[in-house]
Image (cartoon, grey):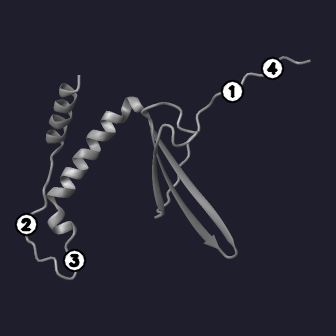
Amino acid sequence: MSAPRMHPSGMIEVVSNARLEGKLEIFSYGQRDDIPNPGDLMIITTNWIKENARVQEIEFKLRIRGRDMDIFCQAAKEALMLWNDNRHWLQAPISNPGDTRAMTKIRSTDQAAAIKGFYDQNR
């Protein structure tokens, strides 16, 4: 009987580019068996590509660890704030924009200050 072989490790680089629109699902711990820890969040997008008589399913899973959720939540809050500030032109019909107010901008220094303030509050 031969000795068990160790699994080798190596560097793997994969480059892929795909632009798909499909359903988006968000799950937390306890809703799926493949979310291992309380606090983890999983975002799954699924799309189907039809080629001739065959259908190919493409699924992309993103799991955010619970320990990193505060970073994700802060980024989501900033995105929502910017969307709300710019709602007047984001929801305007393309045929009749009508509103000439400028787009709200947030500089990287403002983002850094907001993130630092968030961490200082939550320590």
> How far from the left and from the top, in percent, is residue 41?
44, 40
Q: In the rendered structure, which disc, 3 or 2, sits on the residue that comes first in sequence? A: 3
Q: Nearer the viewer, mark 4 or mark 1?
A: 4
Q: Which residue is mark 4?
A: 4
Q: Which residue is mark 1?
A: 8
Give the answer, above or below, for where 25 lies relative to 98: above
> How far from the left and from the top, in percent, is residue 92?
19, 73
- Residue at far left of view: 101
Q: Nearer the viewer, mark 3 or mark 4?
A: 3
Q: Which residue is mark 3?
A: 93
Q: Does 115 sit left or right of 62 as displayed?
A: left
Asked if the residue at tag 1 contacts the one at tag 4, i.e. Cβ–Cβ closer than 8 Å, the answer is: no
Give the answer, above or below, for where 20 lies relative to 82: below
> Which amino acid lies under the numbered mark 4 shown in the image of this protein?
Pro
- Residue at far right of view: 1
Q: Does 32 sit left or right of 1 as displayed?
A: left
Asked if the residue at tag 4 contacts the one at tag 2, i.e. Cβ–Cβ closer than 8 Å, the answer is: no
Q: Which residue is mark 2?
A: 101
Q: CA distance from mark 3 to mark 2?
A: 15 Å
